């Protein structure tokens, strides 16, 4: 992997990740951009304890542009975009309309390929491995920023999810706090540790699922399964078999196997609902241990957390979505229409 860092016209950082060491990245961003001004603010909900980001400047962000005006395609034929060069393998840059900025964290965009009409599932294993390297490198770099406590790499795919740019891309949020979802996990880890005299909850879950009927795909170094209490109609959790707290902890064997396993999962997701269906909308979310102190979690440390990826879709059947209505949105109690065992069975049926 070759890494080249540069700056866009408004001062934002942009980084090329190339498969070939001889690629030269010296294109200059000639757009007449003024320096980005953000109004991101973190507010703490005194009743729930949640942290809320208020980012009014995002009201003016780019919204469903036509393909020939895509800001994530490379700059070509006189049309200037967020990527100054005429091609790229993987590129990461600071979001022009960030939810988090400055002392409130940082937001980055990760473009998986310069092909506007592709998806992550269309990548080769070599290309997917490069994305993994980019996620890992950004996790390392962002973790050293003084305002950052947790790094979250994720992909939203599909208009039904709320994606406003069709180009295959994901994002990285660097939060200045431990997110509520992660805090819940850490509290459960602490409770399990106390109840079992030192046992690890993540290890217990992995051991239980390995022997069960919800396994979707198993490699030598990775396990994919539908969780016992899945929230979403089709939801898969992907774990390295050796517990590590973050992407930095993956060994070479796990890194080598990941592209094959993950690409197979994504391709199965696109086959869940049968031939002729539009691509399955999904969210793919990496869960990593916070880099900040964990004093609030009763002796739990970073090594007690298990890196994993959660992949899920809001489509529950052909032409129908799972909406977060009263129970889910009002009380955080999910009601799942698809039994997890049946979801796992279906995901095995559509294997390549």
Image: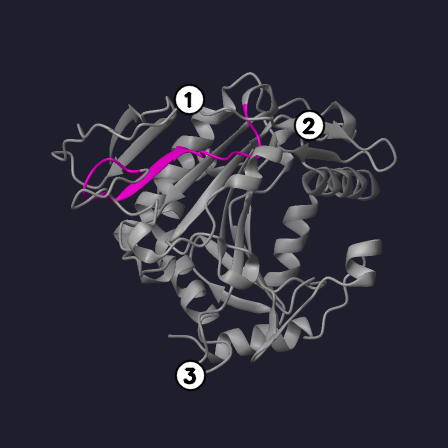
Q: Quadrant of the N terminus?
A: top left
Q: Looking at the picture, how far across and down is residue 195, in whole percent?
A: 83, 43
Q: Name the foreground residue: 46 vs 56.
A: 56
Picture disc at residue 35: 1
* Residue at figure coordinates x 47%, y 38% from the top left: 247
Residue that label 2 marks: 42
Q: Name the foreground residue: 336 vs 156.
A: 156
Disc 2 versus disc 1: distance between alpha carbons? 22 Å
What main secondary structure does the magenta stretch of the protein show?
Answer: loop
Q: Looking at the picture, how far across and down is residue 182, in whole percent?
A: 68, 40
Give whichever of discs 2 and 1 has the lower sequence position: 1
In the picture as drawn, the residue positioned furthest to the left comes out as: 22
Q: Looking at the picture, how far across and down is residue 215, in whole percent?
A: 56, 67
Q: Residues within 10 Å of mark 3 (few under 14, many from 20)?
A: few
Membership of 98 in magenta stretch: yes
Residue that label 3 marks: 275
- Image check: 80 left or right of 336? left
């Amino acid at each position: 992997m070759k890494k080249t860092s540069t700056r866009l016209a408004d001062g934002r950082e942009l980084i090329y990740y190339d498969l070939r060491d001889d690629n030269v990245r010296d294109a200059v961003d000639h757009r007449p951009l003024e320096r980005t001004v953000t109004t991101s603010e973190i507010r703490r909900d005194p009743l729930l304890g949640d942290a809320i980001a208020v980012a009014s400047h995002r009201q003016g962000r780019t919204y469903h542009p036509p393909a020939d005006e895509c800001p994530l395609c490379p700059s070509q034929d006189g049309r200037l975009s967020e990527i100054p060069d005429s091609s790229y393998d993987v590129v990461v840059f600071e979001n022009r309309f960030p939810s988090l900025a400055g002392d409130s964290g940082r937001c980055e965009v990760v473009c998986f390929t310069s092909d506007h009409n592709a998806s992550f599932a269309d990548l080769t294993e070599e290309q997917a491995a490069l994305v993994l390297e980019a996620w890992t490198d950004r996790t390392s770099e962002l973790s050293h920023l003084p305002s950052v406590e947790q790094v979250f790499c994720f992909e939203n795919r599909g208009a039904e999810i709320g994606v406003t740019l069709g180009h295959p891309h994901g994002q990285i949020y660097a939060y200045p706090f431990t997110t509520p979802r992660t805090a819940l996990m850490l509290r459960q880890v602490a409770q399990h540790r106390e109840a079992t005299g030192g046992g690890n909850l993540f290890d217990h879950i992995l051991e239980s699922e390995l022997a069960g009927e919800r396994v979707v795909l198993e490699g030598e170094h990775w396990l994919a399964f539908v969780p016992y209490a899945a929230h979403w109609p089709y939801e898969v959790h992907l774990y390295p078999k050796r517990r590590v707290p973050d992407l930095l902890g993956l060994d070479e064997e796990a890194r080598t196997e990941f592209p094959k396993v993950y690409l197979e999962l994504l391709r199965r997701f696109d086959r869940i609902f049968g031939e002729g269906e539009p691509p399955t909308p999904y969210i793919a979310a990496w869960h990593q241990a916070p880099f900040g102190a964990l004093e609030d979690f009763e002796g739990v440390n970073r090594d007690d957390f298990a890196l994993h990826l959660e992949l899920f879709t809001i489509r529950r059947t052909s032409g129908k979505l799972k909406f977060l209505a009263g129970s889910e949105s009002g009380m955080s109690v999910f009601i799942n229409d698809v039994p997890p065992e049946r979801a796992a069975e279906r995901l095995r049926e559509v294997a390549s």
